[in-house]
Amino acid sequence: MTKTHVTATVNGDPVEFLADPRETLLDCLRDHLGLTGSKEGCGTGDCGACSVLLDDVLVCSCLVLGVEAQGARVETVEGMAQGGTLHPLQRKFIEHAALQCGFCTPGILVAAKALLDRNPDPTESEVRFGLAGNLCRCTGYDKIVRAVLDAAAEMRGAQ
């Protein structure tokens, strides 16, 4: 099958890659661009481990074709830190020990960022709802929710 030339902006940088029209965005990010933070947990959009932002919309990259990224902005977990400075969500996940095996963490971080970008002062229920598409098999979610709430407060300057 003929590959398609795709140009996009990934984590603020212009990129180009050749994608098989049947190839997922997840596979393109991992195999063509070397961005392995996003994980394939289920391949059906049920677990959220592959969550990325596509033109500011949270998507499961296992359900989006790579060719659909043509001309789009894609943000992955690798783009959250700025230089050597972790994003407040990343720091709070560490401070709250809000991860165990870490497989789901990149997707949860991206989903939490999407939530805080549109709602900088969420309630606990709103955080739980906002992360409902991201499954974690190791934690009870409480530390994750606390980390997101703490990061939100810090980002608002409410501390």
Image (cartoon, rainbow, N blue to C red):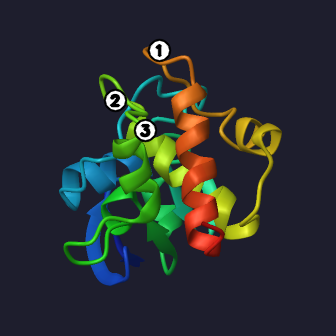
Q: Are marks 1 and 2 in contact (CB under 8 Å)?
A: yes
Marks 3, 2: nearer the viewer: 3
Q: Is residue 153 left or right of residue 16?
A: right
Q: In this orientation, which residue lies closer to the viewer: 4 or 36?
A: 36
Q: Please report the residue visible at 28 percent of the width from the left and 77 percent of the height from the top.
A: 16
Q: In this orientation, which residue lies closer to the viewer: 143 or 43?
A: 143
Q: Which residue is mark 2?
A: 103
Residue 83 pos. (x, y %) = 22, 78
Q: Is residue 99 visible?
A: yes
Q: Please report the residue visible at 68 percent of the width from the left and 57 percent of the height from the top.
A: 115
Check disc 1: other Cα within 10 Å, few if <14, some if 14-19, many if 20+. few
Q: Is residue 137 left or right of residue 82?
A: right
Q: In this orientation, which residue lies closer to the viewer: 58 or 18?
A: 58
Q: Are marks 3 and 1 in contact (CB under 8 Å)?
A: no
Residue 119 pos. (x, y %) = 76, 64
Q: Is residue 140 left or right of residue 10?
A: right
Q: Amino acid at mark 3?
A: His
Of the numbered discs 3 and 2, the one sitting upstream in the chain is: 3
Q: Which residue is mark 3?
A: 96
Q: Which residue is mark 1?
A: 137
Circle 2: element type: loop
Q: Amino acid at mark 2?
A: Phe
Of the numbered discs 1 and 2, the one sitting upstream in the chain is: 2
Q: Looking at the picture, does residue 13 appear above or below residue 86? A: below
Check disc 3: other Cα within 10 Å, few if <14, some if 14-19, many if 20+. some
Q: Amino acid at mark 1?
A: Arg
Give me the C-alpha separation between circle 3 and circle 1: 17 Å
When asked about the image quadrant of residue 102, the answer is: top left
